[in-house]
Amino acid sequence: MAICRLVGYPDLFITFTCNPKWPEVQRFLKDRKLKVEDRPDIICRLFKMKLDALISDCRKNKLFGPVMGVNGHHNVDNLDNIISAELPDQEADAEYFKAVEEFMMHGPCGKARFSSPCMANGKCTKHFPKKFVNCSTFDEDGYPIYRRRDNGRSVTRNGIDLDNRYVVTHNSHLLLKYRAHINVEWCNQSRSIKYLFKYVNKGHDRVTAEFYRTSNDQDGAQVLDEISMYYDCRYISPCEASWRLFGFDIQFRTPSVERLSFHLPNQQSVVFADDDPVDNILSRPTILQSMFLEWFEANKNFPEARKLTYAEMPTKFVWKKDIRKWQPRKRGFSIGRVFYVPPGSGEIFYLRCLLNKVKGPTSYLDIKTVDGVQYDSFRDACCARGLVDDDREYVYAIEEASHWATAVNLRRLFVTLLMTNSIAKPEVVWEAAWIHLSDDAQFKIREQLGKPDWIISEDEKKNFALTEIEIMLSAMGKSLKDFPGMLIADVVNHCRTTNRLIQKELAYDTIAMKEENDALVDKLTEEQRTIYDNVLKDAENNLGGLFFVYGYGGTGKTFLWRALSSAIRSKGEIVLNVASSGIASLLLPGGRTPHSRFAIPIVVNEDSTCNISQNSPLAHLIVQSRLTIWDEAPMMHKFCFEALDRSMRDIMRVKNHNSFDMPFGGKTVVLGGDFRQILPVIPKGTRQDIVRATINSSYLWRSCKVFRLTKNLKLRSLRSDSEVQEIADFAKWIANIGDGTIGDSMDGESEIQIPNQFLLSCGEDPIATIVDSTFPMFRSGHRDNEYLKDRAILAPTLDVVDTVNEYMNDYNNAEGRTYISCDSICKSDSNVDMLADLHTPEFLNGLRCSGVPNHSLTLKVGSPVMLLRNIDHSLGLCNGTRMIISKLADHVLEAKILSRSSAASDRSVVAR
């Protein structure tokens, strides 16, 4: 995209395929009585020579005109001189006709010869025009407008008579010169660049390999191993192996693209080795000569540099690493691309926006100056240049919601806007809406002081709201200090000044916890009681044990976690409950995701550690904790557990000198889950890759004691014997699938016949059948939250999801309101104009993918909805939380949580 930004979109898309019947190859093999596949090295070397010659023809000989320049308008005559899509005259140009006949391809089925099985009765069984979506213009029938005249010329291949309709676009000169299959297609649409990206990034060749063992018994009969093992492998052909051994280029770009680093004042990066003394690092002569700072110096010394933006600098100047200076180029040029930073990065994001616009600055102050006015921050400068959207919409949203929402909900909405980087200037929104955000300040303070007539000032109201916002942000690992421009709360006069993480984990009623624990322990099964006693004994004696509770859904793992948590908390001690998915963590008392609780990196490797400093509030929380429970553990990569293990061993050394030799630093940890369910997701990974990524492949597993839960406790709540038997049979069938005892094959893939008693008898409308079975009372207008809470329909595709939603929404008689998304390209990129051409609002609005709502969303009061992102886990608002709409407005809506662990509180949530 950086190249396209400079020279424009490509005009021609040329594919060059090696021809093993080249005369040079045939002569070499004939003399040695070899086959083509016997000498892939010769094939590769010859193809490389011809490929270089083709590139030279295009670049030096200007076969198609000047290269790396934006060509002018091409009329039909010029296009026909470059590209042909017809059979030549057999008599007038016999050699050309022979070449076309030899390498002629039928377009709709890709690069296959006419003997391809897709040809039937002289016609291709595929849709013809699809091959040419990136070529010339199209007629009303969808066919590309090339000069394909019905001139009577034809050729017979394999008994099939073929005319001009089956000729792939080509260039006659290239076809005659190289005697190979060379497609030459004209790119007339900007969208063709997306096909180019797909073409060069489609991945390696793959092959499915089968490994088996054979042996002979005493009678001489051959016996095959009944267990077949299949591997999805990367396939390296002899030609690719030879190509790589020769060191030939796998891909080639010209001109080169140079990545440009930048930094905020006094924040440049310094690279040093582990054993480099700090004094030597700081005394380096070039420590202050970063590429970015030297750009300022170049702008002072070279008038030509002052005409360029930072991204344009490599086109006229070159960065000399030995002297760490920008120097004028003597030949050639490169394309600059500024490193990407996400919008939530703060000032450095706004600096990047400006670097793609400002030319020739000599200091940071020049970058902040717009029309002679010097601004205090890069963000303000972006606003002055119109690079940041207006925040009035968010002010309207808060004002609109203030008519029915409480101040607490409004503050949560404000925090959500801050955390999602929706607001460009949060201080402006604060100044316009603080009166709504602090509406309950006087009432709360009167209640705390016990003085019903107490009057507070506006500053005290603002400080109250800011303090409450600070508390909400701290629970998410953020602070008001992270948002430049926002006022900072005066917490000196506020009562909540201790470690809020520890305070929150100790804010349980120990008496209520004791009562809950007594009730839970009485209901424990023998299996659960054994696990309960072992874990509590280990935690109380600080033995640092690692346990794994293995059981399928319904065996009472969550019930056991509640019993363990209440037992520890009833004694005024801390339990850290986490689950690998956000929605699963809602089932745990005080549950969080492990990434949120332990600051585990999103991208982990075998050397990763958690982002926890030694004296941080989170580190003190871990030190004071008694037990950690991690549910749904098998679905997490083993590196996540190992990262936490390394971090806890380091953190616990202040309390336990032997922590480095104990799993998780000597803290008791309980893992739970079912290996028959979802394992870690490894992109393009094989079965072996997935198995190697699970927790039982980690070094920690050697220290783990495994318990099993086998009894389905859900059957206890059923009253009907027939229903108990039905659920028991279904649970057993599911467990057998997970154990691999159903199906003919044991290689991981087999066809399974679903018993009829587990299927719905489908009528004419399958959607109506499944909806009526799942929600039999919905048609009658039954809208009880408890009724909706226990039911859900899982769908395999987004189309089915939309169909089910529309079907159910039609039975809701409430007035609907349609919300439209706002899609645009990020303005911080230097390619923003080009990206806007590729990704128009119409294109962005038409995207439909998992995790992103549709462009148009029609909602009604009473409609169930589901969150697609994490907002506030303490309220149960995370990816997968189900809610029901209670109010609709232009900019905001109100919904009530339906999740099992949060519905009892009947909280209302205001969301934009």
Image (tube, rainbow, N blue to C red):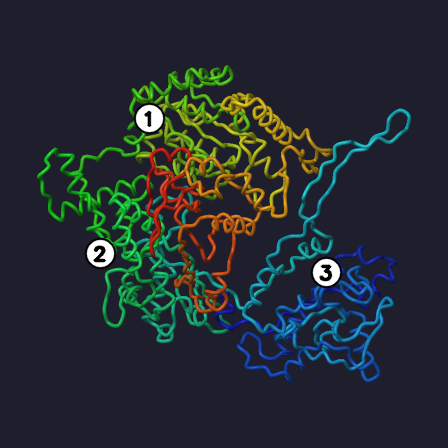
Please count the marks in the image.
3
Q: Nearer the viewer, residue 635 or 201?
A: 635
- The picture places residue 232, in percent across and down from the top left corner, at 67, 44
Q: Residue at the location (86% across, 66% down)?
A: 158
Quick one: SS at disc 1? Answer: helix
Q: Which residue is mark 2?
A: 432
Q: Is residue 659 above or below residue 411?
A: above
Q: Which picture quadrant has residue 643?
A: top left
Sequence-wise, which precedes: disc 2 or disc 1? 2
- The picture places residue 24, in percent across and down from the top left corner, at 80, 67
Sequence-wise, which precedes: disc 3 or disc 1? 3
Q: Is residue 346 above or below residue 174?
A: above
Disc 2 marks a residue whose amino acid type is Ala
Q: CA distance from mark 3 to mark 2?
A: 69 Å
Disc 1 marks a residue whose amino acid type is Gln
Sequence-wise, which precedes: disc 3 or disc 2? 3
Quick one: SS at disc 3? Answer: helix
Q: Nearer the viewer, mark 3 or mark 2?
A: 2
Q: Which residue is mark 3?
A: 44
Disc 3 marks a residue whose amino acid type is Cys
* Residue 624 numbered mark, or none: 1
* Residue 745 numbered mark, or none: none
Q: Is residue 700 above or below residue 186?
A: above
Residue extending farthest to the front is 780
Residue extending farthest to the right is 219
Q: Which picture quadrant has residue 770?
A: top right
Quick one: SS at disc 2? Answer: helix
- The picture places residue 842, in percent across and down from the top left corner, at 48, 65
Q: CA distance from mark 3 to mark 1?
A: 65 Å
Q: Nearer the viewer, mark 2 or mark 1?
A: 2
Q: Is residue 36 left or right of residue 728?
A: right
